[in-house]
Amino acid sequence: MRSATGWRAALAVTLMASTFGLLGCGSSPKDEFAGMTTDKLYEEARDEAANGNWERAAKLYEKLEARTAGTQQAQQTQIDLAYAYYKTGEKAQALSTIERFIKLHPSSPAIDYAYYLQGLINFNENLGLLGGFARQDLSERDQQAARDAYQSFRQLTLQFPNSKYAPDAQLRMNYIVNTLAAYEVHVARYYFRRGAYVAAANRAQQAVQEFQHSPATEEALYILGISYDKLGLTELRDDAQRVLQKNFPDSRYVTDGFAVTSKPWWQIW
């Protein structure tokens, strides 16, 4: 049996071991970039980005941004960091970084690219969202990313019409408009087929009002007419029919849908 002195010695050793263990766990990890100059950080970050190593590039840009805060170099670093986040799929961080740049440097020579990148981040997110209509209930799908992308591209084209990014931004805006219109029509069709005629009419009308020059307007007018027909709103139905016939005289919805045929005109899908 141990003496009191022996127990105290053993306890002291245990406490010391625990203390050293805790200190070891709490020690800060070694900074792998500590010995690198800002020039070296930037050079290596660019090399990693060029080789597609975006996660490594992002880490280097993060360190570089912290080192160059308040300097001219920090502006370029913020843009590079936002793009690196974008390439690694870190949408929230990419948007946060580029929005910070826009807020802090509204007169920067690179502000046009900042708006373009802001739109691009949301646009690519949107491609995945809109790529498979059948995979989920479209009435629950969020289209905010598409609208945010559109606003960024629109701001770019309005403020900097001569920017080298403006033509591509305009093409993407057109795509977004057509995609959003198609989405609204798809949802309207979804509601109509389930007998929700008021909801179908509302979504079709929204597509007509918001996206007048989109190809999807043709079907939107058709759905609007057949929804009104189902609701017994014959005057509104006839108005929708007239607008469809005037704007799309060769539409299959006119020739096959509204014409007197053996097939009911609301069942040509």
Image: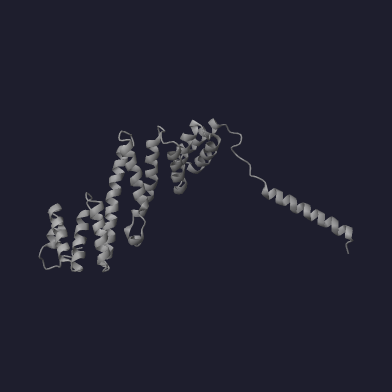
Residue 59 rendering spot, x and y as whole percentages:
53, 41
User: For the C terminus, which image quadrant?
Assistant: bottom left
Total number of numbered discs in the rendering: 0
Q: Nearer the viewer, residue 53 or 95?
A: 95
Q: Nearer the viewer, residue 120 or 35?
A: 120
Q: Quadrant of residue 152?
A: top left
Q: Is residue 224 left or right of residue 90?
A: left
Residue at 23% in and 54% down:
208
Q: Quadrant of residue 250?
A: bottom left
Asked if 161 appears above or below 91 in the picture, the reply is above
Q: Is residue 263 left or right of residue 200?
A: left
- According to the image, what is the colour scheme of the structure? one colour
Residue 225 rendering spot, x and y as whole percentages:
18, 62
**Residue at the outermost left position:** 260
Q: Is residue 104 left or right of residue 128?
A: right
Residue at 76% in and 52% down:
17
Q: Nearer the viewer, residue 66 or 5?
A: 66
User: For the N terminus, which image quadrant?
Assistant: bottom right
Residue at 52% in and 37% down:
65
Residue 165 rendering spot, x and y as whole percentages:
34, 37
Residue 268 rendering spot, x and y as whole percentages:
18, 64
Asked if 84 appears above or below 224 in the picture, the reply is above
Q: Is residue 89 visible?
A: no
